[in-house]
Image (cartoon, coloured by chain):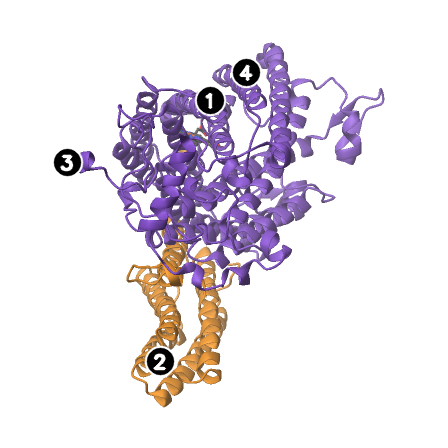
Amino acid sequence: MASQVAVEQDAIIREEGYDDHFHEHHHGDKYQSNFITTYIFSQDHKIIARQFLITGIFWAIVGSAMSIIFRMQLGFPEESLAWLKPILGKWITISADGVGTLAPEFYYALVTMHGTIIVFFVLTAGLSGTFSNLLIPLQLGARDMASPFLNMLSYWFFFLASIVMFFSLFLNTGPFSGGWTAYPPLSALPQASTGSGAGMTLWIVSLVFFVVSVLLGGINYITTVLNLRTKGMSLWRMPLTIWAFFITAIIGLLSFPVLASGFFLLMFDRGLGTSFFLSEIYIAGEALPQVGGSPILYQHLFWFLGHPEVYIIILPAMGIVSEVMSVHARKPIFGYRAMVYSILAIAFLSFIVWAHHMFMAGVNPFISNFFVIFTLIIAVPSAVKVFNWISTLYKGNLRLNTPMLFAIGFVSMFISGGLTGIFLGNSAIDIVMHDTYFVVAHFHIVMGVAAFFGMFAGVYNWFPKMFGRFMNETLGKIHFWMTMIGAYAIFWPMHYLGMAGVPRRYYSFDTFDAFSHFDGTNKFITIAAIITFGAQLLFVVNFFYSIWYGKKMTTKNPWQSTTLEWTTPIKGIHGNWPGKLPVVHRWAYDYSKDETSDVDFIPQHHPLTENEVRTEH
Amino acid sequence: MSQVEYQRRNKIHPHKFALWVAMASIIMMFAALTSAYLVRQAAGNWLEYRMPGLFYINTAVILLSSFTLHGAYLGFKAGKELLYKVLLVISFILGIAFVVLQYYGWMALYDIGIYLTGNPSGAFFYMISGLHAVHVLGGIAALVVALIHAFVLKFKVTRKRKNRFQLVLHYWHFVDVLWIYLFVFVLLQH
Ligand code: HEM
Ligand SMILES: [Cu+2]
């Protein structure tokens, strides 16, 4: 049955597809003639997607390993870390009785790098870089991106950013250590802390490259979505993944330049002696010449990107979850239009709430009220999405495979973390909560874990499309359950720490009697983190093992999905479709439409049946 | 030539569209800087100074270059080879003149005691006009490419070359208008 459907699908494209004369011009070979142009400086969006993914996985391992190291120091300060000396060298100090301790400066450096790496390199580049590249042309019926060359540059700027950041880890003075938000004066004065010198210089250079990468990518995504959709693919027929990537790219394009401006001003302050962000500072008892600047100004510029950035991270995950959930629940996504409008609403609102990160920075309390209101309004479109996901699951014919489990896990995480956002969004409550572990719990659950879940759902779901093989299901399920339980075990207790006022980013709580009874909690969190980290190694093993030895994909459309990417050959080719392009006749969610048929999905390129024409028009 | 040539059905060329999207992000960058300017100015301790006359002249220079480049484009479209080449060269010279004159403008500012490391009002102006000059340099690089096309390739009015020229033209108009916005902004904020 399934193979018969497949044959029929090919025939539809062959007979009724759109002929763009693509293969009459043999320019494909020009791009991919040897190993270097095929796999390294490739201009093919499918290869670039894999490059983003694998670089992202590398950074995810590095970034999480850092968190394990600083958690060990925080949870078990009395245990010896001397065994880390071969890797960390002088950052481990050994006391007279042989106990190795992480140097406080390096603790801060690790916290900073962990945040920077996970937020920018993993959850921005690794997530939206991978899936926007893979899915935008494939799901829209395009031969490639609007500008494959810019697309290649986008990856290589990310690579350059990665190299610079990686190099900074090995500096004699260590990498930057002033927090992932890089507030001045720690980031503006090279003499302010050990990491503020060369470490910060490399940090900012790396991130400027990164901004270039995001902008080049974003320009391409937007242009491709608006200009290269195949015939029949109207905006309202696009899968929600594409809507999410599209809006994400727009947000990025409008907010990252603002961050760049902030960085330029910061560079001037660092190198040229201006005082945009600096005023009346004493270092080691000596007054600095800079006067008249405002550190709050930097915070405005940073958070004008910073808040949209969290949505740049979460929207692609939301798109992936919507798609995966609909496919594996065998039901149309509930409230497709509401899903699109809520993405648009979230995107719009994300630009007018940034000051909720600055309630405690001396912002006028009257102005704060506006930000409170807009911040709380974001909960409305967020709730619409959650409601729609749950309704999609309701009475669905659920396939509880790994991608689906991660999609459902995403919804759980998003609810838990979103609710704590509502606490923080009230400026009065934030007076107590700001800069405590409550905030850490909030954003790790709603952004860190949820976005990772979206990414996992995507990887497990589209792995066959990327590598022609499946990942191992059993390992996948173990990975899911360990991560799900582990993540809650790590971050749930942090809410209690935060409510008791335990500040984030502290190296030690020895001198605070009030927090001494949290010793056990901190140990528990550290152990949970180590186990959860171990579970991620299962994923890494599964991923690389499956690339070469996974179960082979034998049919084009293993998930019986309606979207166009599953009509392309199993082994991807340049230009994506061998002959004509599919023409789209319907939206992406025709699942279980015809109860009498034993095929419970109708692909997007299938013409409307007579029955449908009669009932729908 | 890329795949888009074969696939597009929309009226606007994807490369041109991509350029507009890029302009939107450049606008955001300068919008951020001018907002920062306003915020900082509102906080007081803000030095007022008189804008050196050179900047007015320079505004005229870049405005003029927009007109000459547009003329070159019209000449190209109409098949008037000489007009096209002459105006293109003039635009290029005016572009270089703009950057050089900006430099002299900064020197003039420096001479009246507005230092980069002094009051933020001066620092902001140096920073914003400097970043703008960098974008003009990008435009000059594009003009160099256009010049090479004009003098190396055989003169022929094709759709593809018209499109390419339009990319340069639009970007050049953009940095021109951007400068006028920035200049008027700074003048009005005095
Ligand atoms: C109902 C929705 C949400 C509300 C009302 C909300 C509110 C807030 C507030 C007020 C803060 C500042 C807390 C403080 O520093 O004192 C905060 C921090 C944060 N939120 Fe949310 N949030 C929401 C959803 C999200 C989502 C969806 C994400 C990411 C996908 C996210 C990511 C973050 C991050 C990364 C931080 C901390 C940044 C830092 O200081 O390092 N939030 N949130
Ligand atoms: Cu926020």
The answer as to whether the residues below labels 4 and 2 share one chain is: no
Label placed on residue A614: 3
Q: Secondary structure at mark 3?
A: helix
Q: Secondary structure at mark 4?
A: helix
Q: CA distance from mark 2 to mark 3?
A: 51 Å
Count of numbered labels shown in the rendering: 4
For the residues carrying marks 1 and 3, which lies nearer the camera in this image? Answer: 3
Q: CA distance from mark 4 to mark 1?
A: 18 Å
Tags 2 and 1 touching, CB below 8 Å: no
Colour of chain B in the rendered structure image: orange
Label placed on residue B157: 2
For the residues carrying marks 4 and 1, which lies nearer the camera in this image? Answer: 1
- In the rendered image, residue A156, in percent from the top left (x then y), is placed at 57, 53
Q: Chain of mark 2?
A: B
Q: Is mark 2 within 8 Å of ligand 1?
A: no
Label placed on residue A489: 4
Along the line of sight, which residue is nearer the eye, A214 or B13? B13
> Of the residues shown, which amino acid type is indicated by label 3?
Arg
Along the line of sight, which residue is nearer the eye, A345 or B104? A345
Q: Secondary structure at mark 2?
A: loop
The answer as to whether the residues below labels 2 and 1 share one chain is: no
Q: CA distance from mark 3 to mark 4?
A: 54 Å
Q: Is mark 4 within 8 Å of ligand 1?
A: no
**Residue A81 can be seen, yes or no:** yes
Q: Is residue A411 above or below residue A156?
A: above
